[in-house]
Amino acid sequence: MLNANGEVDEEGLKRVIDAADGKQITFHRAFDEARDVFAAFEVLSRFDAVTNVLTSDGKPSALEAEPIIARLVEQSKGARCTVLAGAGLTVDAVQGFVASTKVSAVHFGSGL
């Protein structure tokens, strides 16, 4: 869902939203490949259907991306879109990570 310039493909996203027929959309970790994640988040937050952005800022673990994720969480205040931090999170690390970033949603996968 990114174009060749590393920006959100807004036309492609509109087609996905239409195909989703009213369902909520999580913009997956293609977000991490955006040229500017803050600009990409701004674009995504303009689409009501996009309710989550899953990110680790391209790092193997979201734990390595705490400063960026914290800035995205700050940027998301007042937006309908939530930062969904994921990749490499563990049960033991999640409490400190949430306290540090103020993220309200996390994604667990194979790390558990």
Image: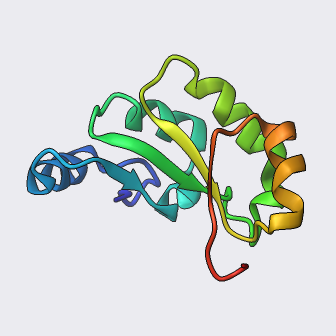
The residue positioned 55% from the left and 61% from the top of the image is 33
Q: In the image, 83: left or right of 45? A: right
The coloring applied to the image is rainbow
Number of on-image labels: 0
Vertical placement of residue 5 versus 83, above or below? below
Q: Closest to the observer: 25 or 1?
A: 25
Q: In the image, 28: left or right of 112? A: left
Residue 103, horizontal then vertical, whole percent: 69, 39
The residue positioned 19% from the left and 47% from the top of the image is 11
- Asked if one can make out residue 36 in the rendered structure from this viewpoint, the answer is no
- Asked if one can make out residue 13 in the rendered structure from this viewpoint, the answer is yes
Q: In the image, 9: left or right of 59? A: left
Residue 92, horizontal then vertical, whole percent: 89, 65
Quadrant location, the C terminus: bottom right
Q: Closest to the observer: 11 or 84?
A: 84
Q: Residue furthest bottom?
A: 110
Residue 93, horizontal then vertical, whole percent: 88, 60
Vertical placement of residue 112 versus 100, above or below? below
Quadrant location, the N terminus: bottom left
Residue 23, horizontal then vertical, whole percent: 20, 49
Question: On the image, which quarter does residue 87 sit in?
Answer: bottom right
Q: In the image, 111: left or right of 10? A: right
The residue positioned 76% from the left and 66% from the top of the image is 89
Vertical placement of residue 94 versus 72, above or below? below
The residue positioned 75% from the left and 71% from the top of the image is 88
